[in-house]
Image (cartoon, helix red, strand yellow):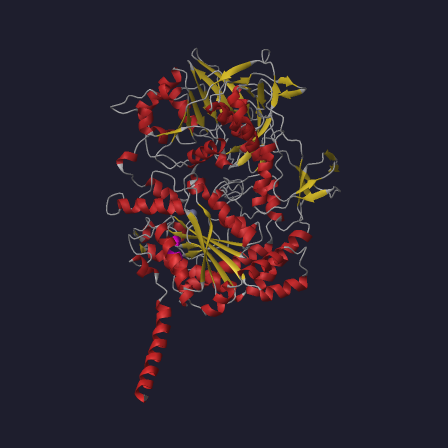
Amino acid sequence: MKRSTVMTRTTLALAVLFLAAGWLAAQTPPDKFLGHKVGEDRKLADYAQIKAYFEKLAQESPKVKLFTIGESVLKKPMIMAAISTPENLAKIDRWKEITRKLRDPRVTPVDEARKLAKEGKAIVLITCSLHATEVAASQMSMELAYDLVTGRTFFDAGKILSEVIVLLVPTHNPDGNQMVVDWYRKYVGTQYEGGGMPWLYHHYAGHDNNRDWYMFNLPETRAVTKVLYHDWLPQIHVDEHQMGSTGARLFVPPFMDPPLPNIQPMVWRGVNLVGTEMGYDLQKHGLSGVVNGRSYTAWWIGACDDTSWLHNVIGVLSEAASVRSATPVNIEPNEISDAYYEKRMDFVDPWPGGWWRLRDIVDYELVLSKSMIKTAGLHKEDLLFNFYQMYKTSIEKVERGQPYAFVIPARQRDYPTMLKMLEVLQMGGVEIHQAKADFIAGGRFYNAGSFVIRTSQPYKTYAWALLEKQKYPDMRQYPGGPPVPPYDNAAWTLPLQMGVACDEVEEPFEAKLEKIGAVPYPKSPAKQGQGAYVLLNSQVNASYAVAFALLKDKAEMWRTSSTVKAKGVDIPAGSFLVKNSPDVQKALPALLDKHHLAVLDLDDIADVPKAALKSPRIGLFQSWRGNMDEGWTRYVFDDVGVPYKTLHNEDIKGTKEKKADLKADYDVIVFADENANTIKGTRPGAAPGGAAAESSMARMFRQSSMPPEYEGGIGQEGVDALKAFVEKGGILVALNGASDFAISEFGAPARNALTGVDRTKFFCPTSILRLLVDNETPIGYGMPKEAAAMFVNSLAFSTSPPSFDWDRKVVAAYPEDEVLLSGWLLGEEYLARRAAVVDTKWKAGRIILIGVRCQNRAQSHGTYKFLLNALLYPGM
Ligand SMILES: [Zn+2]
């Protein structure tokens, strides 16, 4: 009996010990799960493994809760882990409620805010590997989660996590992660190991997925935006990237000049606090080569982390030196770039050179991520109260130059596109009101139904920055010297890009306003589409979407060739006439409903000047150089419902077995913005979109050698095949830089007047410029006479009177003065009177030169029509 009691006690004690040990051991370390060390040379976990690891950890640890926050373009679930104490995770709704209250001082008085800041928890967000080739952070995320739940930190994890909710998105781009890892595994051990992929690492956007943070075209952007500004409202957001290999080992903030003017100083103080603490902790761990205050500016460019600044969130970017995917690099000391060789006050401990491995990046990122969590925990109460204070300032303080409101008149050339703009603003958290009665503001009359965006609102900075015109500071390398280029965009003004009328009103005004919930899309009139014919207005982008859908169903259609008066209304040239057949009658109501469109009914079209329209067979060229502009063009085509086939080098130049006859299969072939030499394949190409649009990291990948099937371009055979295509009546569309290809290979009667002009004389980094448009000519159909266009490494054509088998028509040109609408322009005179869009005719076909980015990043809806008109050329 006694003996058995002893036995029982021993068993019990053992069981307790075993349980305790078992509880710890039950949290599987990522190394054990993956079968290799995180960041080991030549080993990468793919998205399926990363997701499975987080699922396992969430099962094993009460400190991890897993959420699905959205779905990628290619239908992969996007996951986010919340990591904190079990007690905190049990009360998530309360923490969210607190941050929501702190965001709105209109409903939360100061005393309550102080109490809430004491009670609440700091919420921090870490997003990893948005740029999928910058793969280290996605690998690191697993170890970070494991370290946090098992207390492997350089601070008291229990204490810090009791004050902090860590939100961790292991990869912001699951599709891209899978592509990159698959590609790496395929070529590891060959001469192509660690080289770049021939296609974009995001189905549409590639590297530009970090320029989508105000237009929200991509579902991945929308998923994280919901976390940031609608659901969790974190106070700190860290986005982890990689850069080139031969400079600093790591960038963390402070950022460099210029700052976007409207952002609150407290945001920068918070950013600097977190960044400086990171530098301190990295140094503590003996990690050298950390730089701040260089390369990365505080001017917003529509990127992930910097979107936070405009929402009073501490947005931090980290950029680590790259390896070749998971293949280490050895950097000789003399290969380190000069700027990162000497000690400087913003670079106090240079890295000496040597081997640099994926694991090194993981180590740096583990420390910087943990440092941010530590800082959030130590400053929790202050952080939450200042979060509140910043919104209070947003609402109550009138900043220098702050308008009272922006008014969007109810009368618009393209009403559905205006509603789309409102939807985009709402996604970014902007509050919008609608007038219930006519009113006067800034001396102008506005109809009831107009929309008003007041600047006095929690996300003032964001709303203001999107709606105002940007003035980029004139920064020079030295007085009178060459300009210092912006990191990317100098301008983005949404109403200009989208062709939406929007007025800035300085002074307060009275109006009967009501805050809108969902964007009020109008019901399409029930009794429309009853006539023998229907007319779709060419001013409205949605008309093109409906036209493509009807053409696909073989509707009989025309485009009007001049302005038509119908029922007392002037309908502009290029509008779509549709014979209202039984099939059309069946399809039309749903289409009009989907696109929020109204049509005009006509019974007789005998007197209407018009040209017939056919469903075009469209090809879109895709080089093996991962061209982002091609990706965005594809996005626009899918969005509008344009039918197309992707064409690669072989499809254009033909093969031994099949000689190319492009006209047999296509009516229109589109070349997105790309260097002429890249298209032809005469030498390794320059970056599509210019060097500014590409990180040195991306450049490193692009320049590495590719398997032979992806080398070269369309060659002379391709050029000859395209010439035959145009001769027989095909339409070749050259977007932006591709115009150089059309000019040099075809001898189109135009040249780029900006070629060879020195930067000190002419400089225009991504800005919005004024164009004068001939909207009675097919490529200008539906456009306003004066339009705003995105100039991105763009062209200015000098046309010339052509020889016998050519003709040319200038569709859009720069005015004589006041060319700049938003951004930065030096040397306006180089653009004055030059053409931006030219419709050239050669033999039976056409070459359309569109020298601006008319579909830039699927954001510039206001100039989509240049491209869509080229696809729907009447009388083709
Ligand atoms: Zn990046």
Q: Is residue 25 above or below residue 773?
A: below
Task: Residue 716: tell me if it is visible.
Answer: no
Front-lying residue, 355 or 732: 732
Give the residues in magenta: 137-141
The N terminus - image quarter: bottom left
Q: Is residue 481 left or right of residue 845?
A: right
The spot of residue 828 in percent (x, y) is: 56, 31
Identify which residue, 562 or 776, lies in the foreground.
562
Residue 352: name its quadrant: bottom left
Residue 567 location (% of width, % of height): 66, 19
Q: Which residue is more in the foreground, 809 or 428?
A: 428
Q: Position of residue 397 (x, y in %)?
A: 68, 52
* Residue 363 as seen in the image, left or right of residue 293: left
Residue furthest to the front in view is 1
Q: Position of residue 520 (x, y in %)?
A: 63, 39
Q: Nearer the viewer, residue 782 or 262?
A: 782
Say left or right for 546 vs 689. right
Residue that protrudes farthest toward the bottom in the picture: 2
Answer yes or no: is residue 200 visible. yes
Residue 87, placed above or below residue 855: below
